[in-house]
Amino acid sequence: MTSITLVQGDITRQHADALVNAANSSLLGGGGVDGAIHRRGGPAVLAECRALRASRYGKGLPTGQAVATTAGDLDARWVIHTVGPVWSPTEDRSDLLASCYRESLRVAGELGARTVAFPAISTGVYRWPMRDAARIALEAVRSAPAAVEEVRFVLFDTSAYEAFARQLDDR
Ligand code: AR6
């Protein structure tokens, strides 16, 4: 069974087999988690992302999918890049958000990663309400096949941490 843990902090300071990046389809960097991962991971991460764009993902990584690269200078073996959906008040994109977690865990399982750290995907630049995002994230991880030993959610601030903690208690 996969154990789920919560910590408050910066995902780029975590040690885990795989760190998940809240990327965008271009795979070429951005702000938030993505900016921090590329800053700390260094040029090796970007080089592999560029190679993915030149091969398998010429049109970019579709929303809800995941792909791994080296973790460069981060304290991990891999970065798993996934693209969350932008929050929409009129369209239910929950399954795409759940897919980010499922697909990242599938890729992690294929790699043999035992510990995987996730940020709260889509809750920053992509504006997904934290409480709903926490519910979707935890449900997706709980219902995924138990290929990894530990899933760690790394929440940037107290309110994000508390939103996840409440959802974890509520089950
Ligand atoms: N460690 C952990 N969590 C963080 C960190 C960090 N270092 N930095 C921010 N967060 P976001 P998204 C939190 O915007 O909403 C980028 O430009 C943040 O407070 O990183 O999926 C990409 O290139 C929020 O709760 O990701 C895309 O264009 C959560 O992580 C777009 O943003 C996710 O915020 C993706 O937007």
Image (cartoon, rainbow, N blue to C red):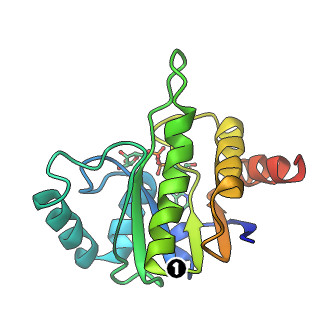
Where does the image place residue 69, in percent across and percent down from the top left? Answer: 32, 72
**Is residue 167 visible to the viewer in this orientation of the structure?**
yes
Where does the image place residue 170, in percent across and percent down from the top left? Answer: 89, 46
Quarter of the view holding residue 51: bottom left
What residue do we see at 87% from left, 48% from top?
A: 171
Where does the image place residue 20, in percent across and percent down from the top left? Answer: 48, 64
- Compared across the picture, whether 23 is left or right of 105 comes to left
Q: Amino acid at mark 1?
A: Ala
What residue do we see at 74% from left, 68% from top?
A: 5
- Compared across the picture, whether 47 is left or right of 109 comes to left
In the image, farthest residue toward the front: 145
Residue occupied by mark 1: 113
| Front-most of residues 92 and 118 | 92
Q: Quadrant of the N terminus?
A: bottom right
Q: Residues within 10 Å of mark 1 (few under 14, many from 20)?
A: many
| Front-most of residues 93 and 110 | 110
Quarter of the view holding residue 64: top left
What residue do we see at 51% from left, 72% from top?
A: 109
Above or below — where is 92 with respect to 62?
above
In the image, farthest residue toward the top: 90
**Is residue 123 visible to the viewer in this orientation of the structure?**
no
| Front-most of residues 159 and 62 | 62
Above or below — where is 1 with respect to 160?
below
